[in-house]
Amino acid sequence: MEFVVKPYKSIGPIKLGMTKKEIRSVMPEKPEDSHNIRGPYTDYFIKSSLFAYYTEENGVCEAVEFTEPVIALFEGKQLNGIPFAEAKNWLENFDSEMTFEKYVGVTSYKLGIGLYAPKYDEEHEPDAYVEAVIIFKKGYYD
């Protein structure tokens, strides 16, 4: 599945601000009911490897995190499943002030996009891949 990222708005058919019911209606599978991986206000869609984070039990979506098989496309470029340095360099074209955290990745507060690459180390693992992408609403990390 290829999903287009629209900063602070959506990833594919999932729009930030949708209710749990709305997200479940656009996903091709039911969420796993018995997980407690990321907390109680989360849907986990196993086959899609996608987490939807909600503000509360019946709240609205404030972030979506995913890995392959979902492919994130931003401005025509794939963000995950590629070398972290390549994805980071691409995003720097749109946000030169991203926050880098070693063994985590980068977060663009300007775009509402984060790249997770825990194995990346410029000296020892420069070719490490982006393992996950998160898109989030403004204020999510406040």
Image (cartoon, rainbow, N blue to C red):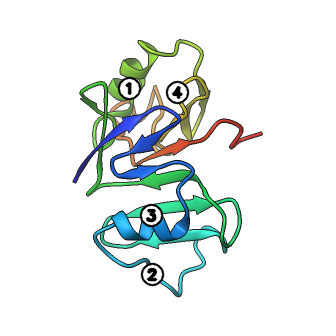
Q: Please give the label number shown on residue 23.
A: 3
Which residue: 24% across, 27% down? 76
Q: Earlier in the sequence, mark 3 or mark 4?
A: 3
Which residue: 48% across, 33% down? 121
Q: Which residue is mark 2?
A: 32
Amino acid type for the residue under numbered disc 1: Ala
Give the spatial CA distance, label 4 vs label 2.
Answer: 29 Å
- x then y, percent, for residue 98: 58, 22
Density class for disc 3 (Cα within 10 Å; few <14, some 14-19, many ≥20) is: some
Which residue: 30% across, 24% down? 75
Q: Please give the label number shown on residue 85.
A: 1
Amino acid type for the residue under numbered disc 2: Glu
Compared with 60, 107 (above or below) is above
Residue depth check, mark 1 versus mark 4: number of the one nearer the observer: 4
Q: Which residue is mark 4?
A: 111
Amino acid type for the residue under numbered disc 3: Ile
Density class for disc 4 (Cα within 10 Å; few <14, some 14-19, many ≥20) is: many
Density class for disc 2 (Cα within 10 Å; few <14, some 14-19, many ≥20) is: few
Q: 139 or 101, which is in the foreground? A: 139
Q: Earlier in the sequence, mark 3 or mark 2?
A: 3
- x then y, percent, for residue 5: 38, 37
- x then y, percent, for residue 35: 54, 81
- x then y, percent, for residue 94: 45, 15
Residue depth check, mark 1 versus mark 3: number of the one nearer the observer: 3
Q: Earlier in the sequence, mark 1 or mark 3?
A: 3
Q: 128 or 75, which is in the foreground? A: 75
Q: Quarter-wise, where is residue 109 in the image?
A: top right
Q: Earlier in the sequence, mark 1 or mark 4?
A: 1
Q: Indicate the quadrant containing the C terminus: top left, top right, bottom left or bottom right.
A: top right
Which residue: 58% across, 73% down? 37
Give the spatial CA distance, label 1 vs label 3.
Answer: 32 Å
